[in-house]
Image: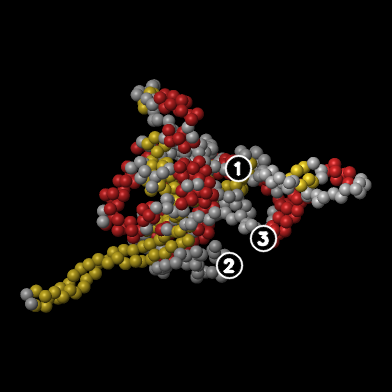
Amino acid sequence: MHILGNSDTKGDYKQLPTEDDQDQTASGSSERQAGPLLPRFEDHATDELATSGELTSNQDPPPEFTTYEPTYFTGGQGHVISHDPHLNEDGEALYRFLLSQANIPPQLFLHCRGDHTEWRNREVVRFENGKRVVAMESYTETVVDFDFTIDVSSYIMPNPNGPLIWSVSDHEAAYRGKMIREVDNKPHTQQTNEDEHVDVETALVQHTLDTVRPTMGIVERWRHRRRRATKKEREQSAWSRNAHHKWGIPPWQSIVGQEHGLQSSIESDHLREQHQLTSDPSLRRMIVRDEVEIPKPNKTLREWADEYCASNKMLKEFVFEKKVYGWNLESLQNSVIQAIHSSHYQHQPKVSWNMVGSEISVMPDTRLARMLTRKWLMFFLWITLIYPLFIWPFKRFHSRGGGEWRVAGSAFAMSTWVHKADSTPGETVEQYSERTAGTKSSANARPPLLRATASGVCEHQGTREGEWFAEWEDTIMNLVMNRTQAVEPIRHPCGSVRTAGIGLDGYYRD
């Protein structure tokens, strides 16, 4: 028998039947009537689940999961700038934000301007000794002949397989968290004579790394082997970046005159394999090395984001760069200048390329950091000498001052080669065309440009710079001869100067 009640109160005990007594009562004992039975645990649990189910069904459903949307704004030159505090604390959030912005292509503009200086005369009235004197004065005036901009952004191809992320090489002099350019390799080897190389610090550094490596994190390991770039390394890296940009070479390809190991790496294994298949010498320009192999990144964008967020510097900045490749911008710029001269323009025109929206900058959410992103505040700080005397020394020399990370970015092609997955190694273009002749979509479609390589057949995608110039040459000459001064960019060709013979049989027309 179970006894329920208060042990301090005598005579108030109440006896309740057990399960054995209940079985005896149910079997036919009519002499004693069973008292009220306590509910079983299973029944009580079932009633609670039913009650909770009714309450849950009457409540509102939980809110749907939403991703974090950081705050940002567009600054000068269309660059994306963010002071979101979460991006400066969480490496995963910063990585996701960069990926969301990495696949948005930048804008490319070609600016053409022509002006000249003319000497002119004017009458000037002066009073000398109370007399009115009229004199002739000569002065110079700049006359604008033409000034227009051509939007070339529509020729930049998007990345259908996601952003193409590249990272700088360990040997490239780049900003890696300080206000000076650094490299992530072993100390520089000093050459004493032609047959002997003495590395004064490698042995000590290697011994230290072997000793402390098990207890060091990822950030500490890379910082331990990081050193300041030499003058030669800085000059070589600056020349390499400039050459890749003006010649339209992707950052992961090595060019002639560039030291080995300076080419960038591709983070995605799939994209790296695709670009490696199109690295045949027959598809490259003469300035690109033939024996280059696209390296794997020793440090991914995610790890760079973690390093940035782990820094406690007050004026740190993470810069993500967007680059375009495929066009020889220098040669195309010279061709445009020649086209302007062919329209009987006698002066020296100014032709330049302008990139808009090519950077993503993340900075701390502090008042000082926000001030440095405002042009009018920077102008005020400069004229009052506050920035050069106080802010810049703190940013440059203090341990918690400034630091810049410019180590990764995304790339967009304007003209590239794509390996055909259905081709076989050693197959010629004629063999591939005959085998795939029945799969063509339309007889009137433009035939693809194919080339045979050691890994198979590759197809050209995009517009080559020569095709663009053939399309826009007459338009550029027409704009120059009409002395066009346009504020808005020109996005479509506006006709040809050769209009007298249009309609005649055999007359040349694009």
Q: Earlier in the sequence, mark 3 or mark 2?
A: 3
Instruction: Report the amino acid beneath label 1.
Output: His
Q: Earlier in the sequence, mark 1 or mark 2?
A: 1
Instruction: Report the amino acid beneath label 2.
Output: Asp
Camera-side mark, 1 or 2: 1
Q: Position of residue 391 (x, y in %)?
A: 31, 49
User: Within 10 angstroms of label 2, few (less than 14), some, or many (20 or more) residues?
Assistant: few
The answer to whether any part of residue 337 appears in the image is no
**Among all residues in the image, which is located at the extreme left?**
129
The answer to whether any part of residue 391 appears in the image is yes
**Structural distance between the alpha carbons of marks 1 and 2:** 51 Å
Camera-side mark, 3 or 2: 3
Name the one closer to the observer, 10 or 231. 10
Instruction: Report the amino acid beneath label 3.
Output: Gln
Q: Earlier in the sequence, mark 3 or mark 1?
A: 3
- Residue visible at 46% across and 25% down in the picture: 211
Name the one closer to the observer, 431 or 73. 73
Q: Quadrant of residue 355?
A: bottom left
The residue labelled by disc 2 is 505
User: Within 10 angstroms of label 3, few (less than 14), some, or many (20 or more) residues?
Assistant: few
The residue labelled by disc 3 is 59
**Among all residues in the image, which is located at the extreme right?**
28
Q: Position of residue 262 (x, y in %)?
A: 45, 38
Q: Which mark is residue 270?
A: 1
Q: Position of residue 346 (x, y in %)?
A: 35, 62
Q: Quadrant of residue 507?
A: bottom right
Q: Position of residue 350 (x, y in %)?
A: 37, 58
- Residue visible at 9% across and 77% down in the picture: 131
